[in-house]
């Protein structure tokens, strides 16, 4: 399986370690109303879709960046990859 | 004063060196290494007049060389300065960056091909699972080799520098030697 690293080109999946659902990037605000329930969902609940899934991969034997990889869990097609830092900056504007 | 003699990463008083027929494999024990990382929001400095390269890039420089290892991070090297406090000199040259000594963390090996680029290309196909177009002359990258993490630098078409964990120097040397012997025996 090849992962198209946005900076380094196509890389063998063996260079990476897998973490899981990219929704982990959306950490709830611990001081907000209903934080306990939000953290319960955040820590314990994961979707397990048959189809397109966004997931976190760590480029351990590479530039040590976290990537958000979009993968089809039915076909193992890799549909795209981007730096997790870029995703966070885009989805959590400060 | 005790009479202390430095040992190379392979544990010998002189660096390892083997000529296998088509390729030369040798240990480089006198190269100084340090990493340089930008602080949050910092801009890239020019330590020792060195332009820090982008992803996959390597710059041989004059007083020191550099290759890109991660966004905002570079490995800086200086030939023949392993016995000096190179990290301290680098910190003086780039005071706003985080500098970490790396000389004692890595073993450095070099493979030279007197026959030109082809044997190095054949070797890369055997030792790493990397798109061959990635590691052209002047490129550097980190990848996976023989269950270890290594940095590969391709200073020229006919040579390859490999940096591996110093604590696994002998394992890496063994893996490289087997591959180099295979190329020499079978092409």
Image (cartoon, coloured by chain):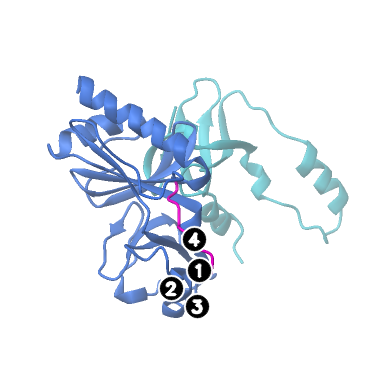
Chain colours: A cyan, B blue
In contact (CB < 8 Å): disc 2 and disc 4: no
Cα–Cα span, label 1 and label 3: 9 Å
Image position, residue B175 (x, y; %)? 40, 31
What separation in Å lies between label 2 and label 3 (alpha carbons)? 11 Å
- Tag 4: Cα neighbours inside 10 Å, few (<14), some, or many (≥20)? few
- Residue lying furthest left: B115
Q: Which residues are magenta?
A: B1-9
**Mark 1 = which residue?**
B99
Looking at this view, is B166 or B148 the one in front? B166
**Residue B94 shows up from this direction:** yes
**Neighbour class for label 1 at 10 Å: few (<14), some, many (≥20)?**
many
First in sequence: mark 1 vs mark 2: 2
Say if A27 sits above or below B96 in the image.
above
- Marks 1 and 2 in Cβ contact (< 8 Å): yes
- The residue marked by circle 3 belongs to what chain? B
Label 4–label 1 contact, CB within 8 A = no
Q: Residue at x 46, y 34 (%)?
A: B171
On whether disc 3 and disc 4 are found on a single subunit, the reply is yes
């Amino acid at each position: 399986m090849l992962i198209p690293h946005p900076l380094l080109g196509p890389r063998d999946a063996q260079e990476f370690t897998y973490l899981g659902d990219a929704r982990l990037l959306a950490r709830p605000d611990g001081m907000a109303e209903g934080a306990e329930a939000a953290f319960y969902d955040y820590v314990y609940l994961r979707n397990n879709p048959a189809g397109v899934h966004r997931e976190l991969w760590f480029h351990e034997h590479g530039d040590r960046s976290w990537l958000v990889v979009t993968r089809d869990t039915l076909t193992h097609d890799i549909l795209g990859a981007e730096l997790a830092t870029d995703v966070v900056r885009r989805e959590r504007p400060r | 004063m005790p009479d202390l003699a430095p040992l190379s990463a392979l544990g010998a008083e002189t660096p390892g060196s083997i000529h296998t027929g088509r390729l030369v494999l040798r240990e480089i024990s006198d190269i100084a290494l340090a990493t340089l990382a930008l602080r949050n929001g910092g801009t890239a400095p020019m330590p020792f007049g060195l332009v820090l390269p982008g992803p996959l890039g390597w710059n041989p420089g004059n007083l020191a060389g550099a290759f890109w290892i991660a966004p905002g991070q570079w490995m800086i090297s200086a030939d023949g300065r392993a016995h000096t406090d190179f990290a301290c000199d680098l910190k003086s040259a780039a005071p706003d960056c985080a500098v970490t000594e790396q000389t004692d963390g890595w073993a450095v090996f070099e493979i030279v091909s007197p026959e030109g680029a082809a044997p190095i290309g054949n070797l890369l196909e055997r030792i790493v699972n990397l798109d061959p177009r990635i590691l052209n002359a002047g490129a550097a990258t980190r990848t996976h080799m023989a269950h270890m993490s290594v940095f590969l630098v391709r200073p020229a078409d006919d040579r390859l520098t490999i940096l591996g964990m110093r604590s696994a120097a002998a394992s890496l040397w063994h893996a490289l030697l087997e591959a180099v012997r295979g190329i020499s025996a079978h092409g």
